[in-house]
């Protein structure tokens, strides 16, 4: 059970999703005895059966040939205006917060607490893992970044990302250049088994996953989802579930949305 970590009062698997297995009752109960109010358990990763839950992954890279002519043009225009390269965690600590703050302010949905202290705490956690950091530069100015968590030598997850919102509208196409660079590095050069951009969003605070599917040939790797609650949380979920479409409190709505994605 050492592969599970507590995140926002919920236990989640702390490794590549293809290695997570279905928990036994004794296992998830042991986690809930420690702390937290629920355990999220995904299993049967990349099952051919279509389910209500999935990870967004990409497992092949054909460089520019996999892109449409419109997407190729956007990537090339991005490369003409911006530079994409690895950066140190020190640079990210010093310059990343102001970028992330603007990014969060631009989200349609605000589902989580984020301030400079939380951001720096996140970077401290990244240091404990095998992480890499990429910057987006306009000449010598950092205008965007992303973190990449290397699960192992053959797969990774694209993590926290921030890009100044003004660059979304000035025809420099930073997201196109950044994702093409990441895909080229991890899939094309290092030949990873797959890269992931996380699991299905339960808050829909951004549209990045739809963007990756539509423009960079990411796909849904279906899996099964089970959620195990403390008894009083399970009772609350049962009572509130019929009203999930009208509840506006983000944290409660997120749990009810996730419950709707479980396979019955």
Image: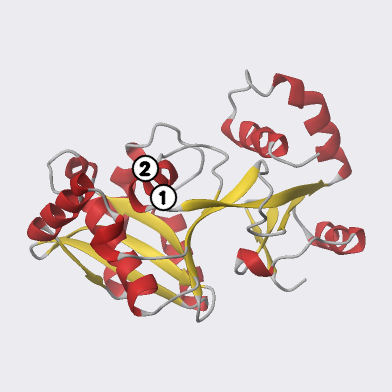
Which residue: 32% across, 65% down? 62
Q: Which residue is mark 2?
A: 104
Answer left or right for 169 relative to 220.
left
The x, y position of residue 66, in whole percent, is: 31, 57
Answer left or right for 181 relative to 37.
left
Which residue: 25% across, 52% down? 176
The x, y position of residue 228, in whole percent, is: 81, 49
* Helix, strand or loop under label 1: loop
Which quadrant holds the N terminus? bottom right
Q: Which residue is mark 1?
A: 115
Q: Which mark is residue 72?
A: none
Answer left or right for 72 relative to 224.
left
* Helix, strand or loop under label 2: helix
**Precedes in sequence: disc 2 or disc 1:** 2
The x, y position of residue 241, in whole percent, is: 75, 26
Which residue: 64% across, 66% down? 18
Quarter of the image for residue 42 reads bottom right
Quarter of the image for residue 145 reads bottom left
Q: Nearer the viewer, residue 119 or 163?
A: 163
Q: Nearer the viewer, residue 8 or 55?
A: 55
Q: Nearer the viewer, residue 228 or 218?
A: 218
């Amino acid at each position: 059970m050492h592969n599970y970590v507590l995140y926002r009062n919920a236990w989640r698997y702390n490794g590549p999703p293809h290695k997570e297995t279905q928990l036994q009752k004794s296992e998830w109960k042991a986690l809930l005895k420690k702390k937290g109010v629920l355990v999220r358990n995904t299993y049967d990763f990349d099952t051919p059966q279509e389910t209500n839950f999935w990870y967004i992954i990409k497992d092949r890279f054909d460089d520019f040939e996999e892109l449409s002519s419109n997407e190729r043009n956007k990537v090339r225009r991005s490369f003409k205006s911006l530079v994409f390269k690895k950066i140190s965690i020190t640079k990210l600590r010093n310059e990343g917060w102001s970028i992330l703050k603007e990014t969060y302010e631009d989200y349609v949905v605000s589902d989580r607490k984020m301030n400079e202290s939380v951001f720096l705490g996140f970077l401290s956690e990244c240091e404990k893992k095998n992480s890499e950091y990429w910057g987006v530069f306009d000449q010598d100015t950092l205008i965007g970044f992303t973190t990449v968590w290397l699960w192992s030598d053959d797969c990774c997850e694209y993590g926290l990302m921030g890009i100044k919102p003004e660059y979304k509208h000035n025809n420099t196409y930073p997201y196109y250049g950044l994702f093409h660079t990441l895909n080229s590095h991890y899939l094309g050069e290092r030949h990873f088994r797959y890269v992931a951009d996380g699991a299905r969003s339960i808050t829909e605070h951004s549209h990045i996953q739809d963007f990756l599917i539509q423009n960079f040939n990411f796909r849904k790797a279906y899996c099964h989802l089970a959620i195990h609650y403390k008894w009083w949380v399970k009772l609350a979920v049962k009572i509130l579930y019929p009203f999930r479409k009208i509840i506006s409190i983000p944290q409660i709505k997120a749990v009810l949305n996730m419950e709707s994605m479980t396979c019955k």
